[in-house]
């Protein structure tokens, strides 16, 4: 697939290599849209991540931050890190950031904490052996997808504001999930199984684990099977989440770009989508939450390679949506694609 500069800017427009001890220096040089890459190694730093700057490690088992803290000031993607042996791991200052494919362990105060009314979104992250709060929010909604919570003596301090808790595993924690999960969310395919880690070195799942291929069906692993739970699942789901091409007309391809991105609620949202298909091709667009629930739908035809959508920031029922990460789906010429988008209210 070919993605536009505008779309790639949020994810991977620039890669920068960090040496030990200079993560903060590199981040200070980064511009919105840059991705700072931290190689394998052990680091100790308090990192303040500016709005629009992403932070990627080499893998949750090889890029390790100890006695560290990452402060997410705005909308950022943080993935492939191991945060361990610290007081507070991640501090979310505004809604719209996503933490995924991370391990968080041995945190004494707050593994993830959010400022007032800031939402927390965690996907494919493993929480183990934490003594403090796993997630602490102050009026912001919590979205948890494909995570593992095991052997934690700390728990959640989030009140009753949950957008989605689905496809998560809870095992041998000091409190039971039903102590904090509202009844309306308690049956969303959550599991209560022994993860069966290979070992406690990196918390990878053993080949016998029942958490393999048990994640959200719309998130895929590298082998294009359904995502495993935890830090090593869903590795290729940042931009292209699923694809199925028409077998009847293989000449058709579906390349698309979204402008602007992130989507900003500033008196009305006007989305311009460039599609590499023939004029007058009918296209179905859908907006979904991270749990796969359809929130809004549009049917349009391509004119001069573009489709323009006007959105009022509301779902089917006229309810306004809060800031966050959503799925945007397009279906045409026998093909369907899903990409993550960010909506800032």
Image (tube, rainbow, N blue to C red):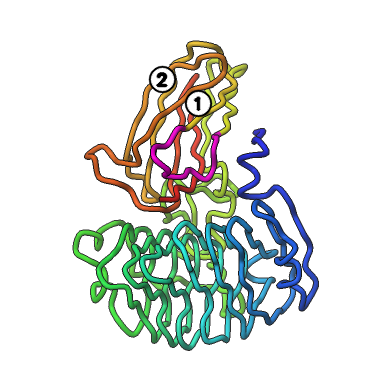
| Displayed quadrant of residue 153 | bottom left
- Report which residue position mark 1 lands on: 335
Write the residue at 30% across / 62% down: 162
Image: 125 above or below 264: below
| Residue 195 locus on image (x, y percent) | 45, 71
Q: Which of marks 2 and 1 is in front?
A: 2
Work out how far the residue at label 2 is from the one at label 1, CA to CA, in angstroms.
16 Å
Does the magenta run of residues contain 116?
no
- Report which residue position mark 2 lands on: 300
| Residue 323 locus on image (x, y percent) | 40, 53
The answer to whether 39 appears left or right of 293 in the picture is right
**Quadrant into which the N terminus falls:** top right
Q: Give the range drawn in magenta.
A: 258-270
* Secondary structure category for the residue under label 1: strand
Write the residue at 68% across / 82% down: 44
Counting residues from the start of the chain, the first of labels 2 and 1 encountered is: 2
| Displayed quadrant of residue 329 | top left
How crowded is the residue under tag 2: few (<14 C-alpha within 10 Å), some, or many (20+)?
some
- Point out which mark residue 94 bears: none
């Amino acid at each position: 697939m070919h993605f536009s500069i505008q779309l790639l800017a949020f994810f991977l427009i620039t890669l920068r290599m960090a040496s030990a001890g200079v993560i903060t220096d590199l981040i200070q040089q980064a511009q919105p849209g840059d991705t700072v890459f931290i190689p394998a190694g052990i680091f100790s730093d308090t990192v303040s991540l500016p709005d629009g700057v992403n932070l990627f490690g080499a893998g949750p088992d090889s890029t390790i931050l100890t006695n560290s803290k990452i402060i997410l000031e705005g909308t950022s993607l943080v993935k492939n890190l191991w945060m361990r042996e610290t007081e507070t791991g991640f501090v979310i200052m505004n809604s719209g950031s996503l933490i995924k494919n991370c391990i968080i362990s041995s945190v004494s105060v707050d593994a993830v904490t959010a400022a007032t009314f800031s939402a927390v979104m965690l996907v494919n992250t493993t929480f183990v052996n934490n003594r403090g709060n796993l997630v602490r929010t102050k009026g912001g909604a919590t979205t948890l997808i494909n995570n593992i919570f095991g052997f934690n003596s700390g728990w959640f301090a989030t009140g009753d504001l949950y957008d989605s808790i689905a496809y998560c595993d809870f095992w041998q924690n000091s409190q039971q999930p039903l102590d904090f999960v509202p009844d309306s969310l308690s049956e969303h395919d959550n599991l209560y199984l022994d993860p069966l880690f290979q070992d406690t070195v990196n918390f990878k799942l053993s080949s016998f684990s029942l958490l393999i291929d048990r994640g959200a069906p719309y998130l895929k692993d590298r082998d294009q099977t359904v995502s495993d739970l935890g830090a090593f699942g869903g590795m290729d789901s940042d931009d292209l989440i699923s694809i199925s091409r028409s077998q009847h007309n293989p000449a058709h391809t579906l390349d698309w770009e979204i402008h602007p991105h992130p989507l900003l609620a500033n008196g009305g949202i006007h989305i311009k989508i460039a599609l590499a298909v023939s004029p007058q091709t009918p296209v179905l667009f859908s907006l979904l939450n991270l749990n796969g629930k359809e929130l809004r739908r549009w049917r349009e035809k391509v004119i001069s390679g573009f489709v323009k959508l006007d959105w009022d920031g509301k779902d089917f029922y006229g309810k306004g949506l809060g800031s966050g990460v959503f799925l945007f789906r397009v279906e045409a010429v026998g093909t369907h694609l899903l990409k993550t988008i960010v909506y800032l209210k």
